[in-house]
Amino acid sequence: MTSGGGRRALVALLAIAAVAVSGCDSKSGSGSGPVQDTGAGSVAGLPVTHFESGLKSGAPTPSLDVRNADGGEDDKLATAAIDDVQTYWGEMLPPDFGVQFEPVKSLLSYDANTDTEETGCGSVKKLVNAFYCPTDDSVAWDRGVLLPMLRKRFGPMSVVVVLAHEFGHAVQYRLGDKAGITKSTPTVVKEQQADCFAGGYFRWVAEDKSKYYQVSTSEGLNQVMASMFLIRDQAGTSAADRGAHGTAFDRTFAFQAGFEKGPKECAAMNTDNVKARLTERPFDKGDKGKGDAKFNDQAVELLKKSLDEAFKGAGVAAPEINDGGSCTTTAPASYCPDDNSVSIDLAKLAELAQPIDREAEMKGEDPGGMGDFAAFAEVASRYALGIQKGVGASIDNPNAGLRTSCLVGAWAAFTNRPGDLRLSAGDLDEAIADLLQPESLVSADVNGKRPDSGFDRVESLRRGYLEGSSVCSKQYG
Ligand SMILES: [Zn+2]
């Protein structure tokens, strides 16, 4: 976030009053259409499952030719992923698009440290990447640096999502006009489609249709989405840049859209509808801290002011925020219902607010902090519980958790304008990264309980951000 400069925003988050009016936990409906799936008990209509994600124990050995493969663990995962994704598209393309599926012409495995193999797109020397090359219709992956780094940090399914994404580009070329891709289509639109196609494939895996892989809809999908955060664009990249892949916020949106709605939805993504919702943007002029504010007393004061302003439409007493304070239920930030206050451990939150060390992160090492917005969002979530309590909503169940992250998203959108405390490039990604952590508070209820599904946590924050606070009580009532 950045602070200082600009006029104070005067617009209140009036829609928050919707919480005040509904304020109920019964799902009997308020007459405004069908009762929505609250998300707490399912993941896009699939049950919440817990088991180890990865290759199935009885998975076959794929019989695909891979040039330069060494047969190690990452080659095994990548080759099985390609074979699996090809089976998926073999099933999907004819009924959905009237197109017969053709496998890619060649596959290449290489070690970015040492290898100098050529593809139709040039040499792979020092290329820490995985890619689809349209010139020779090939898919290549770096088994030396990229895949082991992902696998060690996020588990085997992170390798699978990378290959499913790259294969998504091969599908784009096969669909041609049917995916609306032309020479002038911006990179970020192609990337959104590829992420979406990967999401479609992951649903098929989650529905247990794959002979190779299994993924749980809780920890498994959480890890997959967290790995998309790692390969996000650098904060401050413009969505118009050549090579922009989109932020983690945008990428998880596309992945979830594919998971929920399937490949036809992905093929319908185009420049107009993608650009309208992309959050990626360059740093504002004068954003000297490159978006990272120090988390100190002054920052907490600004945060309190910003939250008071955003939630004043609810018409309830605003919680105080105190360093130390009267309870430690969910330290380092806790909502204390007895005196309607938020207790924080400023020093601990300041550690969390340290900028992410991108170099360490890319080496698979501890990235230090999670960025300032992660700390702001954790405190904002506790504050939002106070507002919910004020309007008579529940604060101690999974729906309360999702409503909380939804309200944090609505607040983030509120700060997305000139004001004392302002959302800056990279902030939303920090919120997503935080949300996908097992111990995140952003979608936790008053006791620190959170829905197992990171999928739901991310979706609730996004909906609040994109649609405003009224959706929070409607969707997670
Ligand atoms: Zn791509």
Image: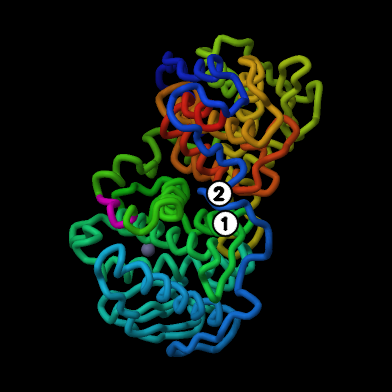
Q: Is residue 435 above or below residue 69?
A: above
* Amino acid on which disc 1 is placed: Leu
Could you say which disc has been placed on residue 43 in the image? Answer: 2
Confirm whether residue 43 shows in the render: yes
* Amino acid on which disc 2 is placed: Val
Instruction: Label 1, secondary structure: give it.
Output: helix
Q: Is mark 2 within 8 Å of ligand 1?
A: no
Could you say which disc has been placed on residue 78 in the image? Answer: none
Task: Tell me the quarter of the picture where residue 187 sits.
Answer: bottom left
- Residue on which the image places disc 1: 221
Task: Tell me the quarter of the picture where residue 177 sits.
Answer: bottom left
Q: Position of residue 190 (x, y in %)?
A: 31, 59
| Front in this rendered view, residue 20 or 301 | 20
Q: Main SS of the magenta segment?
A: loop
- In the rendered image, which quarter contains the C terminus? top right
Name which of mark 1 and mark 2 comes first in the sequence: 2
Q: Position of residue 76 (x, y in %)?
A: 55, 82
Image depth: mark 1 or mark 2 in front: 2
Structure colour scheme? rainbow
Please state the extent of the stretch shown in magenta in the rendering: 266-270
Q: Is 267 covered by the magenta stretch?
A: yes
| Front in this rendered view, residue 374 or 72 | 72
